[in-house]
Amino acid sequence: MLPPSFDAGELSLAELLDIALQNNPTTKQTWAMARASAAQYGESLSSFFPSVQFSSFYFRQRAGFPETGVPTATAGAPATISGSGFSTGITESYFTETGPDVILSYTLFDFGQRTATSLAAREALYYADLTHNQQIQFVLETVMSDYYNYLYEMAVQRANEANLANAQMALDAANEKFALGLVALGDVAQARTQFLQSKINLTTEKQAVENAFAQLAVDLGLPANVPFKVQPLPEQVIADPLLEDICTLVGIAQNQRQDFLAAQANLRSKEASLLEAKRAMLPVIGTQVSTGRYWFNPDGIGEPKNHWTALFTLSFPIFQGFYYQNQIKNAESNVELSRAQLMQSELSMIQQVTNAHMGVKTAALNLTDTDEYLKAAELEFNIAITSYKAGTMTILDVLQAQSSLADARSKKAGAQKSWFLSLADIAYATGSLCATPNEEAE
């Protein structure tokens, strides 16, 4: 699904995120898995309810019986007694029986086996839901990163275009002085070399822009050849980070990071599965009640009243080739694995929060410093090109100033990208990308 403004104008970051959430295939996969887990949880609850089944049958029999009052043939004797006038005969008989039954079964007590099974399924559902939520945040963070990377590549392209213009200016100045006989041919050669290098850099950067655009389109769930425009970064970016301390941010992440919460739910699910495995060896008390009515033919009569049966059962395993013991060992190993995964998830989360916290501060400083660096490099180049034309500086001074200006432009674009990415990283690391203001306050 695409917004109405997709082909009309520039798309904002919010619109890009909306498109990604509707089209990205990874969120569709995790949502389908969450729905499957919900169905499995509902399936686990079915054992708490009685089971009612309908059964019906139709029985038809054809059989032969000896005629009444007629001597029967003995084994090995002929069927007809010669000269007696008597003979044995077989009478055919048909018998039909039909009728329905309704059977109700219910487990009265099983020492919590059903409870453990449903608890494991419920925690597995929480795990699937939280994993889906984490995937949503991952898609948001990915789209934001690639959006800023695309704008960064665009900024680098503009910087390379400006660098090419500066190289052209230096080459023109060298040609003018050479035509007047004021400099040697070496100045022209050096200026031309710098010009061609800037031209190659621009051509290479155009490819990088196309690659970044294609990656952004794929993250949106769109073909890479679909054209669209995005809103550029603001001209003036002010970096004023106001961050909590590390411990506070880690506490926020522990309450909001969906992958960390999912790891906790996974551990609880495996613990419930272990409890289920242990209780599988305990007795199960059940009951079954059935009722129905039968009809018989050829007499055409039926039971005057419904027949019924009541059954109480007690069952428990005695020995099954160490099956239940190995089930318990397997469940215990899964619990240990889930506990280790939870520990790893927490360590990774704390590391990401710490790195993101420092990343915001570093990006803010770099943004300020690169702005000053760019102003100084522009001033240096202007002085160098003017002084070269006046004959007080050499072409090497101009090329050095030109290289510094190109580096300053690149670092300025990189600092802007790092600033916005650092904000996205700290939001993702603390699980705040999808959190409401109230949730963040809690």
Image: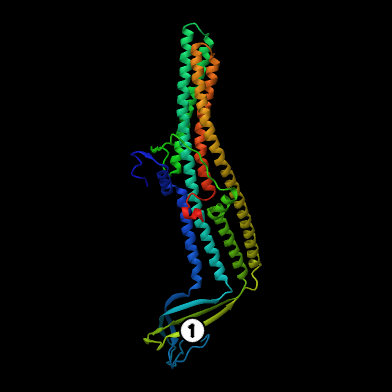
The 10 Å Cα crowd at callout 1, few under 14, some 14 to 19, many 20 or more, is few
State the residue at coordinates (47%, 36%).
237
Where 121 falls versus 141 (above or below)?
Answer: below
State the residue at coordinates (59%, 48%).
246
State the residue at coordinates (46%, 55%).
32
Helix, strand or loop at mark 1: strand
Image position, residue 133 (x, y; %): 49, 53
Where 2 falls versus 306 (above or below)?
Answer: above
State the residue at coordinates (50%, 64%).
41
- Image check: 320 left or right of 93? right
Where 364 falls versus 301 (above or below)?
Answer: above
Reading the image, the residue beneath label 1 is: 309
Image position, residue 436 (x, y; %): 46, 53
The image shows a total of numbered marks equal to: 1
Q: Relative to the observer, which residue lies in front, 182 or 185?
A: 182
- Image check: 411 left or right of 55? right
Q: Relative to the observer, which residue lies in front, 380 or 83?
A: 380
Image position, residue 172 (x, y; %): 46, 14
What colour scheme has been applied to the protein in the rendered image? rainbow
Residue most extreme to the top: 181
Image position, residue 401 (x, y; %): 53, 21
Q: Amino acid at mark 1?
A: Thr
